[in-house]
Amino acid sequence: MPSPTPLSGYPEWLPAERAVEQCVVDALRRTFELHGFAGIQTRAVEPMEQLLRKGEIDKEVYVLRRLHADEPDAGTPEPARQLGLHFDLTVPFARYVLEHAGRLEFPFRRYQIQKAWRGERPQEGRYREFCQADIDVVDKDTLPFHYEVEIVEVMAAAFAGLPLPALRMQVNNRKLVQGFYRGIGIEDVAAVLRVVDKLDKIGAAAVEAALVETVGLSAKQAQSCLQLAQISGSDASVVDRVRALGVHGDELDTGLHELALLLDGARGSIREGFELVADLRIARGLDYYTGTVYETQMAGFEHLGSVCSGGRYDALASDGRTTYPGVGISFGVTRALAPLLSRGLLTASRSTPTCVLVALANEDSRGASGAVAAALRARGVAAEVAPAAQKYGRQIRFAQRRGIPFVWFPASGGETSSVRDIRSGEQVPADAESWLPPASDLRQQVVVQDATG
């Protein structure tokens, strides 16, 4: 068989890298559950009409089809619906809410940590298969504004438990920008939002040109849009700077009020390594956002774009009788971790979960060594028996190569059992029914490397 050719855009982690990802996912799950979010999982595929009904994403959707798609399915009288792999977790979650609304309690607080797929050009920070971690709060008909503040609080708590560089969450309000645009006479607000959302990627001059040439704005309107986009700050002075532009309107007033409430309400979430700022460049290109929007950049990796994004949506989930407004945010687990892992900035304390290798004196004693390993596992200590009854020196070297910190020597010939820390060489008598390793060795840990070292 010829050597396989790697596929770009589909990350596969080595054991130590996978351990880092699992530690991060476990930390996220614990934080989300501490805040009352229930975990769910949705199917990987959705009908194409569901996937394409909101936002500019059609060119990135992977279509699902059988190899012999032209052959009719046995027992299927009607043509099969065209399916696609979901490109995020928000659209399938909206479908999930509609489908299961009768069995859910509202407000419904959900977290979801799952794979998604996009047909993008692979590059750092952009992958065709990736893991996301989402939280959302959804209610019936109305959703109080305080949940838009809570999303910031929950993610700030989650980030505090992650081995990441400093994070800067930038927030805006779609009512603010839409009200401003309408106040200067712009009719196609969605088109302007999609262009302004590209400001960081293509620059101010290109955005201004696109607003005039593609959207059809006047030069004055385009300049006003850029003036708004250049406003940022961490307190309510942002509101005054918008007011100074001389645009008026009820929707604009509502957006400004909500932005000020968010900055004030989430002030307690600001801590070392987490910053919250209002940045009126932030628009979010997807059409379904209606209130607060969030984007988050990682210090030193701003070229990745946002690693944690989301916002408020009022009409994404509706069955025609009942509307389920919500607010949520998505953390790109793969997007954030991949560059840190590839640069060696994060690694695991060991590449295997095994904490103890139980030595094997001879093959006849395999049962006794297995009993020791079972006793350790029963108390939460990951253990395995040596693969072969070699000299103890070779078994110790096997543990060293695997990164296993302890070797257990079962009792034999009248001697009591003992355990050796192969890093320090210290060996002490031990009983499998009571011995525990230091807490730092019990499970794999994430190790943050010094970027300057």
Image (spheres, rainbow, N blue to C red):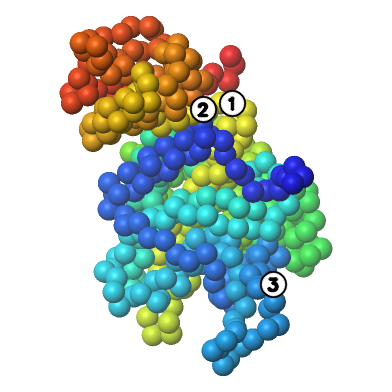
For mark 1, what is the residue? 344
- What x and y, as percent, mark residue 359? 36, 20
For mark 3, what is the residue? 67
Task: Look at label 2 and name its amino acid.
Answer: Thr
Image height check: is 126 above or below 422? below
Q: Quadrant of the C terminus?
A: top right
Q: Calculate the distance from the C-alpha at mark 1 to the C-alpha at mark 3.
A: 40 Å
Looking at marks 2 and 3 on the same chain, the residue that comes earlier in the sequence is marked by 3
Task: Look at label 1 and name its amino acid.
Answer: Gly
- What x and y, as percent, mark residue 45? 54, 68
Kind of element beneath mark 3: loop
Task: Determine contact: label 1, label 3, CB under 8 Å.
Answer: no
Q: Which of the two residues, 114 or 239, is positioned nearer the viewer here?
A: 114
Task: Determine contact: label 2, label 3, CB under 8 Å.
Answer: no
Task: Determine contact: label 2, label 1, CB under 8 Å.
Answer: yes
The label nearer to you, 2 versus 3, is 3
Near mark 2 (Cα within 10 A), the count class, few <14, some 14-19 or many ≥20, is many
The residue lying at 45 percent from left, 25 percent from top is 388
Q: Which of the two residues, 132 or 349, is positioned nearer the viewer here?
A: 349
For mark 2, what is the residue? 347
Near mark 1 (Cα within 10 A), the count class, few <14, some 14-19 or many ≥20, is some
